[in-house]
Image (cartoon, grey):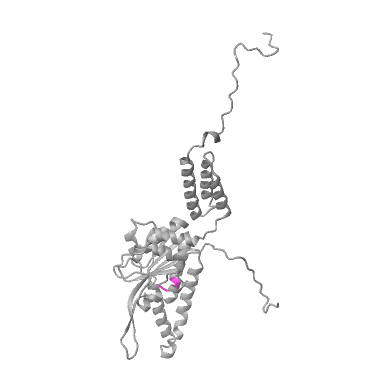
Amino acid sequence: MSKPNGRTFEDKPAARAQVPLAVGFFGPSGSGKTKSALRLAAGIQSVVGGEVFFIDTEANRALHYADQHSFRHVPFVAPFSPLDYLSAIEHCVSHGAKTIVIDSMSHEHEGPGGVLEMHDVEHERLGGSKGTSMLAWSAPKQARRRLINTIVQLPVNFLLCFRAKEKLKIVRGKDPEPMGFMPIGGDEYIYEMTAAALLLPGAYGVPSWTSEDFGSAQMIKNPEQFHRIFEEHDGKPISEAMGAAMARWAVGSELSPMAKALQQQIADATAETIGAVSAALGAARKAKTITPAEFKALSEAGAARKTAIDTAPPLPAEQQQPPSDPPAERSPTAREPGDDS
């Protein structure tokens, strides 16, 4: 069959691979966005390792939690254009970030130098007429798309916090229709999230994964792969355990060749070899030939194997190895053949 433009493609059986998480939180002030993001980040970090970086546009409010959580703090002041956010993200990645919390993404939309202000400046530059308003969106929207594309493509976990406010849908000739709480920011961000939770007023970090309000329901993302995790934590605040569970899904089930070899060694370990296997596991972690998630899983498997060995009942007498006969002691008066002394 001819190829219209000469391109060729490859295919292979589909298999799970490690993917980064992108989780959004939206809610009004006091709903628990910052604390929830830090707790989820700590859980993710326990699986994937690396540093947690916090990009703070909220006048250093993240530091209120510095005695409860470990993270690198990145103060971020105006201007808040998409490319300024991109520069902050690039700083974090260049310094080893594996998980990045941004609080708040709403400044990118409505803050000084944000997308709305960029549009107004561009509109004025183009003459300020009614006909140029739509054209003035081109530059800020392109900058936002560049930021979103970078977030999606980086091998880093992102936790994005959005302020939210209640919105109404105005329909001529009808009463305003409540839309519920909706994030202040570009809808494009929520569409790119792996999951997105609504935090209602006074929720104290307890997420809502459903809503009767049409607008809120559109912004919530509760994907099938996380249903079991969210159901197990139903009615509870977002926690480190939830973050760890989501990260284990994101890591995927496929082990590296080194991890597979160690897994087999653990399964075959005996009382005499379990110590050597444990040492090999530690060496692999130090050499970074296995991931933090693999090390954690293999450590748990190794501990379980050691417990099984230590608590195993003794073998019946008939299955025990009989002791070898000790060498016969030589009588003091015994004489070897040819001993003439």
In the image, residue 24 above or below residue 335 = below
x and y percentages locating residue 2 in the rendered image: 70, 78
Magenta-colored stretch includes residue 67 = no
The magenta region covers: 80-84
Q: Quadrant of the C terminus?
A: top right
- Residue positioned most to the left: 202
> 159 or 263, which is in the foreground?
263
Please tell me which residue is depicted at 41% across the width and 77% down the height of the picture: 115
Across the whole image, how many numbered discs are drawn on residues? 0
Q: Magenta segment, principal secondary structure?
A: helix
In the foreground, 338 or 182: 338
Query: Looking at the picture, does residue 289 appear above or below residue 115?
Result: above
Image quadrant occupied by the N terminus: bottom right
Whether residue 250 is situated above or below residue 176 in the rendered picture: above
Q: Quadrant of residue 88?
A: bottom left
Residue 95 shows up from this direction: no
Position of residue 175 in the picture relative to residue 226 (left or right) = left
User: Where is residue 91 shown, x and y percent of the image?
Assistant: 46, 63
State the residue in front, 279 or 15: 15
Q: Residue at x 32, y 60 (%)?
A: 64
Q: Is residue 81 magenta?
A: yes
What residue is rendered at 58% in x and 54% in y? 257
Left or right: 44 as drawn, with respect to 203: right
Q: What is the x, y in percent for residue 263?
A: 54, 50
